[in-house]
């Protein structure tokens, strides 16, 4: 079965670039433009991994991570952050929220795919 990734980013261009890279490696890709939309997607379908930006309207990525971690069915969902934020205090806040890894934009597509594969191998899939 093909693994699925939910990309959460308010930039359509970034979502397209991430989708292209991940689909090139055989992943199914779901998209959401912010945390509120992502929670709606997660209520219908649990992906194998969540990849989120931090700075978004409606609901930011760190709030999304906290909300996802608070739901029993999502508590162990592998979550990676892909953002322009690189300050240590923001990364620490992301870890406290429950992020499993951090990538900084602009991203290298190969590194992104390798990090996703590593996170899936290390943290496993929670999707039924």
Image: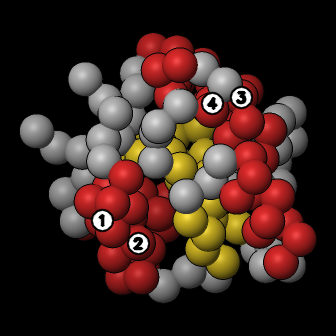
- Residue furthest to the top in view is 44
Query: Mark 4, residues whose alpha carbon is within 10 Å: few (<14), some, or many (≥20)?
Result: many
Q: Which residue is mark 4?
A: 68
The vertical placement of 72 against 24, above or below, is above
What's the distance in space between the residues labelled 4 and 1, CA to CA? 21 Å
Pointer 3 with pointer 4, Cβ within 8 A: yes
Query: Mark 3, residues whose alpha carbon is within 10 Å: few (<14), some, or many (≥20)?
Result: some
Q: Which mark is residue 117?
A: 1
Q: Which x, y percent locates residue 53? A: 69, 56
Q: Which x, y percent locates residue 87? A: 85, 79
Picture residue at 31% right of the left edge, 30% below the top: 127
Pointer 3 with pointer 1, Cβ within 8 A: no
Q: Which x, y percent locates residue 28? A: 28, 45
Q: Which mark is residue 82?
A: none
Where's the C terminus, which quadrant? top left
Mark nearer the N terminus (4 vs 1): 4
What's the distance in space between the residues labelled 3 and 4, CA to CA? 4 Å
128 or 39, which lies in front? Answer: 128
**Element type where label 4 sits in the image:** helix
Q: Which residue is mark 2?
A: 115
Mark nearer the N terminus (3 vs 1): 3
What's the distance in space between the residues labelled 3 and 1, CA to CA? 24 Å
Pointer 1 with pointer 2, Cβ within 8 A: yes
18 or 91, which lies in front? Answer: 91
Mark nearer the N terminus (4 vs 2): 4
Q: Which residue is mark 3?
A: 67
What's the distance in space between the residues labelled 1 and 2, CA to CA? 5 Å
Residue 20 visible, this orientation: no
């Amino acid at each position: 079965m093909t693994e699925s990734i939910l990309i959460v980013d308010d930039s359509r261009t970034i979502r397209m670039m991430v989708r292209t890279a991940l689909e090139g490696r055989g992943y199914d890709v779901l998209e959401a433009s912010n945390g509120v939309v992502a929670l709606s997607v997660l209520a219908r379908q649990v992906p194998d991994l969540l990849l989120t930006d931090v700075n978004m309207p409606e609901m930011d990525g760190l709030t999304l991570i906290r909300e996802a971690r608070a739901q029993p069915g999502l508590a162990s969902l592998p979550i990676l952050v892909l953002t322009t934020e690189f300050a240590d205090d923001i990364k620490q806040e992301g870890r406290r929220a429950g992020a499993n890894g951090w990538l900084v934009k602009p991203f290298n597509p190969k590194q992104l795919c390798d990090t996703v594969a590593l996170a899936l191998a290390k943290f496993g899939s929670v999707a039924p």
